[in-house]
Image (spheres, grey):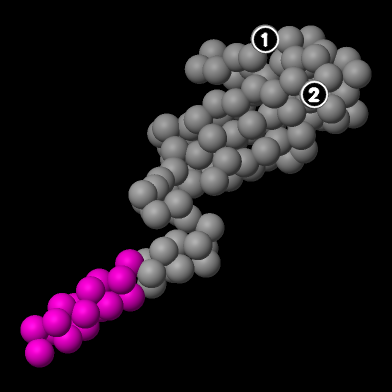
Amino acid sequence: MSYAFLRNTSHLVRGRAAFALLFCAAFGIPPSFAAEAPPARTVDIAKFAYASKEITIAPGTKVVWINHDETPHTVTSNDKSFASKGLDTDDKFEHTFASEGDFTYSCTLHPFMTGIVHVRKQ
Ligand SMILES: [Cu+2]
């Protein structure tokens, strides 16, 4: 009688844990980081332009720029809140936008290259 009760209880607990793990796996969420930051966004730098030139993200989003050109470029914000070094081919620069706002940036080597990041609660 008491053995049967214990078996039933442990079965219930295992079932719940398994469900939680399945739920996280189904959505690609690591179980302990279910309330983590939004996924990173990538901006490609190619043919002397940022693509996309304009993006809208939620606060806390990390943006990763990747230079695909043979020519060095930078990612330099107009308000100097972020600035990369000269990025060679395949170099990356990342910045996490903590607060809302509109952040314009350009390449210091080619000032006609411009982009903007809109940070908005969604
Ligand atoms: Cu450039």
Q: Position of residue 122 (x, y in %)?
A: 45, 54
Q: Nearer the viewer, residue 90 or 96?
A: 90
Q: Nearer the viewer, mark 2 or mark 1?
A: 2
SS for callout 1: loop
**Assess mark 2: CB under 8 A from ligand 1?**
no
User: Which class describes the residues within 10 Å of circle 2: few (<14), some (14-19), or many (20+)?
Assistant: some
Up-down relation of residue 5 to residue 65 (above or below): below
Determine which residue is flagged by label 1: 85
Up-down relation of residue 11 to residue 104 (above or below): below
Disc 2 from disc 1: Cα separation: 13 Å
Q: Position of residue 98 (x, y in %)?
A: 42, 32
Residue 36 appears left or right of 51:
left
Q: Is residue 106 visible?
A: no
Residue 5 appears left or right of 82:
left
Up-down relation of residue 5 to residue 40 (above or below): below
**Assess mark 1: CB under 8 A from ligand 1?**
no
Q: Which mark is residue 17?
A: none
SS for callout 2: loop
The residue at the point 57 percent across, 41 percent down is 40
Residue 76 inside the magenta-drawn segment: no
Q: Nearer the viewer, residue 109 or 71?
A: 71
Q: Is residue 27 visible?
A: yes
Q: Position of residue 77 (x, y in %)?
A: 60, 19
Mark nearer the N terminus (2 vs 1) = 1
Residue 115 appears left or right of 79:
right
Determine which residue is flagged by label 2: 90
- Start-end of magenta stretch: 1-17
Q: Report the amino acid beneath label 2.
A: Asp
Which image quarter: residue 60? Answer: top left
User: What is the chief secondary structure element of the magenta stretch?
Assistant: helix
Q: Position of residue 66 (x, y in %)?
A: 74, 28
